[in-house]
Image: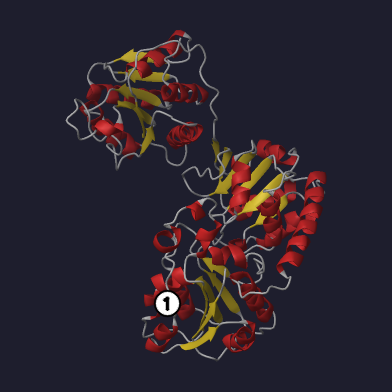
Amino acid sequence: MYCDTTQVNQLTALLVAYNIRNAVVCPGSRNATIVHNLYELHRQGKVSIHPVTDERSAAFVALGMSLATQEPTIVCVTSGTALLNCVPAVAEAYYRHLPLLVISADRPQQWIGQYDGQTLQQTGALEPYCRTAQINPPRSESDCWINNLHINEALNSLYHGEGGPAHINVAIEKPMFSFNTVQLPNERVISVTCPTNSTPIPQNIVDIIANAKLPVLLIGQYERGDIRKEVADIVENKQMLVLPEIISDVPGNHLMNAFDYLSTQTDALEPDLVVQIGGNFVHKSFKSLLRNTSCCVIRIDEGQGLIDTFCHLQYKIQSAVQPALAQLSMKLPRRHEGVAKAERRLVDTAKILEDGLLADEEHLTMNCVIRHLYMKMQTLACDYTLHLANSSSVRIAGNYFKSGVQPILCNRGVNGIEGSLSAAVGYAMKMWGLSIVIIGDLSFFYDANALWNVSLPSNLRILLLNNNHGGIFDQLKGLEKSPARDKFIAAGQQTYTAAGIAQTFHIGYTGVQNFDDLRPALEHFIVPDGGSQIVEAFVNG
């Protein structure tokens, strides 16, 4: 029987899956459930365990075993300063790239710093020689998911790159000594593969993609090189359904908009396999759909860590994206029936959405202002870069502007409202062509000091959508029930205008109250030699 502590059983199942066969165990009460499970594996012939009382010595014994076997070896210690005794061996393993796995039991986090015995900050205790994978008692499915991801990440770090030590810190609560679990959980194993010179993706993974009913190539924010040719080949050959974000610099974001719309419908398309590249994703409904399905996710990037945006990561290809996509375009079968069928449906849906967006509107809204700018930009002969602020600006712009046609930039890594205008100013200072910023009032006034710049470039154009509050808060279902929303949450009930700011910093300014004002304002706005300008549209929603 195994212990009844969920997170310990998660860890044990993954130790078996990764075929870690040697463990040195130290005495203690807090780590007793971990040692018990290792003993159960020992009884089954899956792990060889060796008791050593002194933790400092035990860690070096485990290091010696790893040196002899060229395989990972566990040293399991209890809570408190027992863990700190492992530092000398961990430092040695770090500089010799030896796969030493330190598993420490920890006390509940709430008792750290409360004069509770053998309780100290164990997360990060072995840095800088190895990171800590913190494993906590799960209260929900999402807690189990993140535990699984952290354990996979730690165990993969033993094998890949240059190799080296890893630390898994397991918080364990009372009651601790219950041993009635017959079978370990079926835990997800995330496989990491590193490329050979000619084939970034192993053939077995290529086969998995080829055999999927609806394989999707999902492209988030991408700024690491030009992959448009490889993606275009995959699209032309209908090998995967390609869904790029507007900030991906790859053509086809109209299909992503359509897929996001269908994600909210009862007859939503559901991919059974996703190849994920790039960074952040804008479309919330699509992200939610993938998280709630059981699709297989394959991520391609050069980083060391595991990124599990959609909670179903199974394979990580540690490779540059361009050669991996080139391999897929060469190896995947053409004219995939499921891809062709889904693409036809998305094209039809995109046309319906476009017709709805182009319908006449009675009021000056953010949507119609951006639409009029888009239509005006089609007549522009010079080069331009589009800068989108968070959050409504980037979402609405995706309905009109097409990725891969001109550069579209957005501080979508982690930023909220800060820095959108400043980043656009910096970009415009170093690039030819117009830099056109679409920004809401909250983001603009927050970052207005971006215009306090003696080198403010003349190619800067700012389209300010002012509805006197953060428009994204209008879309948060349920928040309208709070009387605090408008004034205290959405920064509303303000009547600020950019006119004074424009005057202070000697920037051209035009205020727009209606459609009659909008058309001539945009005409002047896109004149290449018109100097830096702000067009402030006072919108209703």
Q: Could you tell me which quadrant the C terminus lies in?
A: bottom right
- Farthest-out residue, left: 115
- SS for dot 1: loop
Looking at the picture, how far across and down is residue 496, in whole percent?
Answer: 42, 77
Q: Amino acid at mark 1?
A: Tyr
Res 73 → quadrant: top left
Looking at the picture, how far across and down is residue 45, in whole percent?
Answer: 47, 11
Residue 483 or 43: which is nearer the viewer? Answer: 483
6 versus 203 height, above or below: above
Q: Residue at x 23, y 28 (%)?
A: 80
Residue corresponding to mark 1: 496
Res 110 → quadrant: top left
Residue 124 seen in the figure: yes
**For residue 119, side relative to residue 359 (left or right):** left
Looking at the picture, how far across and down is residue 382, in whole percent?
Answer: 63, 84
**For residue 133, side relative to residue 51 (left or right):** right
Q: Residue at x 48, y 58 (%)?
A: 413
Q: Residue at x 65, y 79 (%)?
A: 377
373 versus 104 height, above or below: below
Looking at the picture, how far across and down is residue 112, in whole percent?
Answer: 24, 33
Residue 152 or 136: which is nearer the viewer? Answer: 136
4 versus 301 height, above or below: above
Res 507 → quadrant: bottom left
Residue 459 or 88: which is nearer the viewer? Answer: 459
Residue 178 or 73: which is nearer the viewer? Answer: 178
Q: Residue at x 45, y 42 (%)?
A: 161
**For residue 167, side relative to residue 41 (left or right):** left
**For residue 55, side relative to residue 305 (left or right):** left
